[in-house]
Amino acid sequence: MPKDTHTFQNNIMNYDKIREILRYLYMFGSSSKEELVEKKLVSSISTFYNMLHRIKNYIDGEYLQVHKATEKGTDKMFRFMYDPFRCPANYLAETYQNCSYTTEDIIFYFCLMQAFVDPVYPEDPYEYLEDSGILDDDEVIETDDAVAVADLVTIVKNIYKNNQSVLNELNNIVPNMEHNNKLFTWARVKSRIEDLVDLGILIESGKNRYVLSTDIFATVESADLSDIQLMTQFFYNCTFLTIPGFYLSSTIEAYLQSVYSKETDSFFNKQENPVFFYKNHRLQNVIDDDVTWQIITAIHNKSAIRYSYKTKNEELLRFDVLPMKVVIDKQYGRQYFFCYNYSDQKYYMPRISAVSDVTMIRSFDKKRIYEALSDNDLKDIHSAYHRIYQTQIKNVWNIALGDTISTVTIHFSFPKDEYPKLFSRLQATRRHGAITELGNGKVDFTVDTCNEMELVPWIRSFGACAVVDRDTNPALADQLKSNWEEALKQYLPTIAGHNTGAI
């Protein structure tokens, strides 16, 4: 039997390849296949169609749309649906569904779980081998609620053999008993069982003997399960990690439909009656949930990691770092992580959406791993992480770290009737810095920052009331002037380039 055939051939063995296409389409809107090749997101047109075929297995055509461009000579364009009122579903989460699974994995777990669910097999696992000569006439097996690993090796082989017609009908998988004997070995069965024990699906009741765990929802009524699902939806919409809660909610929904099929309603139907509207910036971060989880795990384990980082020039760099914090940019919803870089012994804040191939370095030099910490810090490493982070972001306005500090001066002029409201807003929205009231509606604001360009969105939010001091901050003033000129082109093309008084 080949490793991957037909339906299961669409699994995602390397999610990073899918991730880049999903992120580009989501962040930059419509794109043609030629553009994706030009951006080196795929190597060729044929590769793009292969990726598209995989994506369509997990994302409904309603969300991933194909349209004809209006420009002459342009081919089909591909885009995602963004409107949260028309599309409140977390559709990108579905792309993880078969991540890293092969045909063998699916078949193996199907047979293994059938061994515990169907009482026929544990009672007489050798039933189908009596005429094969493998089993002696006087050889019997004693059974109870638990099943031994040695018996499961035989049981799963029988289940595989007896379900060949189903496998062939659904996936065109041709029986291959020689492959069967290699697939269902004691070592492989034991390894899968240990995975299921870690997940709490199986429980070890004795040495190498296992039982299926108790159904925790068996005594829960349908209405209560709906409340539990609503709770899981609330939390995965609020937390920065979505996928675990999303799949828990999906599992409860599948359980409800299976056990209480007559009592389920459309309350959780994504289109008819959505409970939560998934925000666009949160949906984008879903694509990086597995990377974020690996970084959080490394922080928890106080481990160093190795990762790849794609620069703006599409260059892929490799770094060894000690991660300390996951940081969320509240203004844009982007995720970063604060870390210590071993190569140049500096602190950085890489953007998680540009990170891939994260692995924990288990064999890292023990003398170097905590070189950024003092001997006293080793008593409570997580507290040391927090202290170092707070020290490094002392002069950070938003996210960007830097070695040099610049002082930004902004002159505010507020209308008399709006002064209390705008002055209160200035006090509430500044990250840090000093405010000096000059009278007659005029206020000076000065702040020390690592990257003055991070202030641009905040300054622009005050419109013509905010003017950057050109003598002290010429580059920032020029940047704001350029931004305003670009904005004016959208409304008043004839006066684009004129000084608006806001700069």
Image: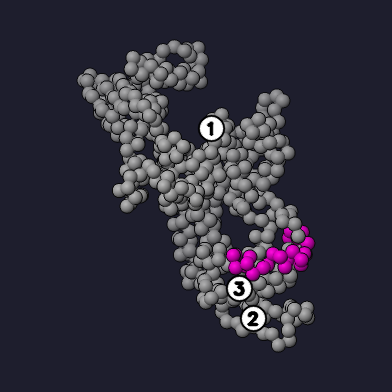
Q: Which residue is mark 1?
A: 311
Q: Percent position (x, y) of residue 164?
A: 75, 67
Q: Earlier in the sequence, mark 1 or mark 3?
A: 3
Q: Which residue is at a point 47% across and 13% down the rendered structure image?
A: 497
Asked if residue 122 shows in the view, the reply is: yes
- In the displayed structure, would residue 118 be above or below residue 66? below
Q: Which residue is at a point 56% across and 75% down the rendered structure image?
A: 209
The N terminus is located in which quarter?
bottom right
Q: Which residues are magenta?
A: 169-192
Q: Percent position (x, y) of residue 62?
A: 62, 44
Q: Which residue is at a point 55% across and 49% down the rendered structure image?
A: 93
Q: Which residue is mark 3?
A: 149
Q: Is residue 51 left or right of residue 316?
A: right
- Residue type of the residue flagged with mark 1: Thr
Q: Percent position (x, y) of residue 463?
A: 37, 23
Q: Earlier in the sequence, mark 2 or mark 3?
A: 2
Mark 3 lies on a secondary structure that is helix
Q: Which residue is mark 2?
A: 123
Tell us which disc is closer to us: 2 or 3. 3
175 is within the stretch colored magenta = yes
Q: CA distance from mark 2 to mark 1?
A: 60 Å
Label 2, residues with CA under 10 Å away: few <14, some 14-19, many ≥20? some
Q: Is residue 137 left or right of residue 326?
A: right
Mark 1 lies on a secondary structure that is loop
Label 3, residues with CA under 10 Å away: few <14, some 14-19, many ≥20? some
Q: Which one is in front, 402 or 95?
A: 402
Which image quadrant is residue 417 in?
Answer: top left
- In the displayed structure, would residue 381 be above or below residue 496? below
Q: CA distance from mark 2 to mark 3?
A: 14 Å
The C terminus is located in which quarter?
top left
Q: Which one is in front, 184 or 487?
A: 184
